[in-house]
Amino acid sequence: LNLKTEAVTALAWSHDETLVATGSSAGVLKVYKYATKALEFVITNAHNGNPCNLDENNLTVISKGAIKCCAWSNNHVFLATSSEDRSVRIVDIKKTSTFWHVEELHQGNSSFSAGELIIIVSADVNFVGWSPNSKLLATASNDCTIKILDVANKQIVFHFDDIHAGNLTTSPAGISTILGPVRSLSWSADGKKIVTCANDWSVVLLDTQTKTGEVLFSDICNSKIPFSIVSL
C-alpha cells in the first residue's frame, strides 16, 4: 500500500498570475509555471524544523518544518515562506535561490501554567504579509507577536509584543489552551497600518508610524472559531 504522507499546506499565486508557489508539510517549496504546469524550481529544505528549549525545566519542543504560508512581494522580486520551525525564508525569484533565511525569528515561551500543567506556547510563524511597496515584510506568530522586517537591509526594524493577550481556558476534559496566537494580518493600502486577528477573537490595529496599537473589535466571533482577514 503506497500512502502519500506529505500534504500541501500553503500556496499562493504570483501577482502577474504566471507562477504558483506551494509549500508542504515536509518543508518543501515548489514553484510552478501556470501556463505550462511545469516545475520552475524547488527548494527541498526550505524549512527543516529544529529543537528549542523553552523553559528552566529544559522541556523541549521539536518544531517541525511544515510551511504555513507563502507570499509573493508586489514587485515580483521575492517569495516569502513561513513555518512551524520559527523561521522565515525569502527567495529571490529570478535567481531561484535564498536571499535571506531568518532563523528563530519568533522564540515562544512557557509562561502559562494550570496547577502542575505547564502550557508550552510554540513560536510557529503562521502568516507573512508584504507591505504595498514590497520593502517590509510582517510576520505573525503563535507567541502573540508581530515582527516587521526590512528585507533589502536584512534587518528586523521593530516588533509588536503581546498584541493579542489571550487567556488560559480549561475544557471539561481538562485540556488547557492558550487563545492568543496571531493567525493573520493585512496591510493598509498606504502601508502605514496593519490589522491582525488571533485566537482570542479580537482584531487589533497597528500603526507602523507611531508603533502603537489598539483593539478594534473584541469577541467578534460568537462561535469562538479563529478566522482570517482577507483584505482591509
Image (cartoon, rainbow, N blue to C red):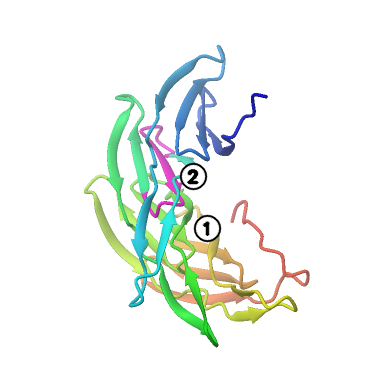
Tell me the SS state at disc 1: strand
Question: In the figure, 34 relative to 181: above or below?
Answer: above
Query: Amino acid type of disc 2?
Result: Ala
Can you tell which quarter of the image residue 86 is in? bottom left
Q: Residue furthest bottom?
A: 115
- Say which residue appears at 52% left-offset and 84% top-offset: 116
Residue 31 vertical placement versus 67 (above, below): above
Residue located at (42% from left, 50% from top): 131
Q: Is residue 163 shown to the viewer in this render?
A: yes
* Position of 161 relative to 5 (above/below): below
Q: Residues within 10 Å of mark 2 (few under 14, many from 20)?
A: many
Taking the view exactly as shown, the residue that stands out farthest to the front is 1
Q: Choose top left, top right, bottom left or bottom right for residue 224.
A: bottom right
- Mark yes or no: residue 191 visible: no
Question: Going 40% across and 30% down the picture, which residue do you hit?
Answer: 44
Number of marks in the rendered image: 2
- The spot of residue 114 in percent (x, y) is 56, 85
Per the image, is 129 magenta? no
- Picture coordinates of residue 4, whole percent (x, y): 62, 30
Question: Crowdedness of circle 1 by 10 Å Cα count: few (<14), some, many (20+)?
Answer: many
Kindly identify which residue carries mark 2: 66
Mark in the foreground, 1 or 2: 2
Mark 1: which amino acid?
Leu
Residue pointed to by mark 1: 185
Q: Quadrant of the C terminus?
A: bottom right
CA–CA distance between discs 1 and 2? 20 Å
Task: Find residue 73 and report its horizontal and vertical position in percent.
Answer: 42, 39
Q: Earlier in the sequence, mark 1 or mark 2?
A: 2
Could you say which quadrant of the image residue 43 lies in? top left
Q: Residue furthest left?
A: 153
Residue 31: x and y in percent read 47, 26
Span colored in magenta: 73-87
